[in-house]
Image: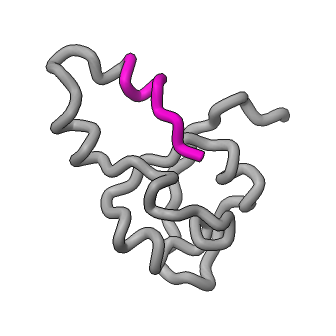
Amino acid sequence: MGASRNPHILVGSYKPEMAEVDAALIRHARILVDSHSVCVLKAGELIGAGLAAGDMVEVGELLHSTPAGSMEGTLRGLHGC
């Protein structure tokens, strides 16, 4: 099975040494997180893929900056990493 152009991945790691998803796949995904500051320190997949806080979009930022009714288009337009 091939990966889609912009896969959506749920990351569950909570320790820097823990990784559940391949770093190459993470680098080609749109990254939506609950907290930049926590993920750059604790999400092993994101750390291993070399991502910085600017490569991720926080859910709260997305919700506060999106007009009602346009969430689907905004999610499709994310440019994670």
Which residue lies most toward the right here?
Answer: 1
Position of 69 compared to 2: left or right? Answer: left
Look at 71% across and 29% down and name the residue there. Answer: 5
Q: Which residue lies furthest to the front in this view?
A: 54
Specify start and end residues of the magenta stretch as a single range: 73-81
The residue lying toward the viewer, choosing from 81 and 12, is 81
Q: Where is residue 67 in the image (x, y as percent from the top left)?
A: 17, 21
Against 68, residue 26 (above or below) is below
**Above or below, 31 relative to 3:** below
Q: Quadrant of the N terminus?
A: top right
Q: Does the magenta stretch include residue 53?
A: no
Q: Is 79 covered by the magenta stretch?
A: yes
Closer to the camera, 60 or 15?
60
Q: Quadrant of residue 62?
A: top left
Give the percent coordinates (x, y) of residue 21: 67, 60
Q: In this view, does 31 lie above or below 11?
A: above
Q: What residue sits 68% from the left and 51% below the top?
A: 27
The number of numbered badges drawn on the structure is 0
Q: What scheme was used to colour the molecule?
A: one colour
Identify the residue shown where x is 47% and y is 25%: 77
Picture coordinates of residue 30, whole percent (x, y): 54, 41
Q: Is residue 25 above or below residue 42?
A: above
In the picture, measured across the screen, residue 81 lies left or right of residue 40, that is right
Q: Residue at x 21, y 33 (%)?
A: 65
